[in-house]
Amino acid sequence: MAGRLHQHRGKGEEFGPFTFLNPTSRRYPLSWKPPGEDSSSEETPGKSIDPPTSGESSTSNKDELRADEVSRLYRSRDNRKGRHAIVVTPAAQKGKYLTPQSTSTAKETLKGIWRMFSTYPYWDVSYLVAVIFTLGSVVWCINAFFVWLPLQNPSTEFPGEIADAGGITAFIGATIFEIGSVLLMIEAVNENRADCFGWALEEVLEENGLVRLKPDGCTHHHKNKKNFVGKGPAVEGKPPLDVNMVRDQPGSKSASAWTWFPTWHELTTHYFKEVGFLACSSQMIGATVFWISGFTALPPIYNRLTTVTAQNGAYWLPQVIGGTGFIVSGTLFMLETQQKWYLPAYNVLGWHIGVWNLIGGIGFTLCGALGFGAANSGCVYQGSLATFWGSWCFLIGSTIQWFEALDKHPVDIEEGGGRVSDTQPVA
């Protein structure tokens, strides 16, 4: 007879940057009880998971790690992206679990980079968001060369480079950012509502009491290959691990169906309290306003903005407002990954994505603000330069997001009581 696996939800294991908003991360230690041991004395047990099945492999291999403790690290960002993070404490000797090695090593990082060029899960909305923002960032980098390089090196300028090539690429880049932002909002309102552990468990045949964890059993909609706007794969008999983390019971229509628009009740009771949703909303609002400046950058339209007031109102002001939206969203995406608002989460990919998008937003906002002083050649140069480095920052952040979207089962190694603020419980 198989044993039982529990997740604990103890005091101090919920984290978030703001106390007035929902927690953004939770930590659940897994507790494996072999057959015959009494689990009734465990403190605050959560919902039990299906017991492990008999494994096909009897012993560990060099790609596996023996662990004394395993914790599930739930992050709201990971949940949106269909990711399932675990924190592993390596065993001094035999251990209780077999887990994959850390995904933060150079070897695993190179594997992740290779996945970016060899894996194309077009049905995964998180993958599409990352690729679309990367494509948009590339277009903006090209645009930045068109508008900045002639100022830096006038001999490289060709006829119509700034006005025509710059205006057309600005419109294309702004449109791509708008499409990506809409998909980002769709991703936000389709977070997994029935929760998803995302790891399968099996007993190792010839080693009594040893349990292997391997990626499997994901119920996120990201796994549905049949259609883009579909349900996640059903896994019968898998209740949520923490009923307080969901708004609907699994199996209900609202828990499994794709959602285009949240209800007002969902907005007021859940989404307006979610840091990630607020970040996505700010991103979409910023991208929508910013698109106006991309539209007015088209040569037939910009050429008709003959007064300073018209240029400031229809072209530069939307850049400032839209760029400010990017700054807010980048800041919130960064803070969403932190246990406290003042504790950077250097070892979380989402934190770096937020930081680079924040810097990129500053560049775009600065470009618009300097545009109000277009009569000054110094403002024109610095504004074009701000677009240049801001575009590259967006490209770096989007590329990391692409890597993140394909890394669905991150494993973090925690030694000596914890190593980083993003996994170490804090008082």
Image: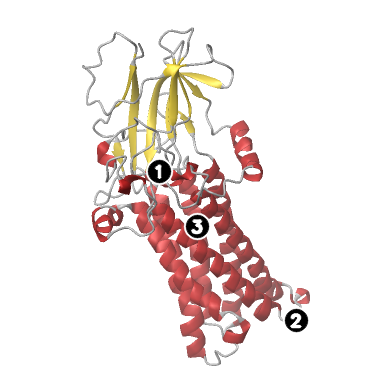
What's the residue at 43%, 62% (across, down)?
A: 283
Residue 79's disc is 1
**Location of residue 119 in the rendering, given as x and y in whole percent from the top left corner:** 62, 43
**Location of residue 316 in the rendering, given as x and y in whole percent from the top left corner:** 50, 79
What is the crowding at mark 2: few (fewer than 14 residues within 10 Å), some, or many (at least 20)?
Answer: few
Left or right: 251 in relation to 199: left
* Depth order, front residue of 227/267: 227
Query: Which of marks 1 and 3 precedes in the sequence?
Result: 1
SS at badge 3: helix
Q: Quadrant of residue 154?
A: bottom right
Gap between marks 3 and 1 measured at Cα: 20 Å
SS at badge 1: helix
Residue at which label 3 appears: 357
User: Which residue in the rendered view is the most extreme toward the bottom?
Assistant: 307
Q: Is residue 323 visible?
A: no
Residue type of the residue flagged with mark 3: Asn
Gap between marks 1 and 2 measured at Cα: 49 Å
Residue at which label 2 appears: 159
Q: Is residue 425 above or below residue 332?
A: above
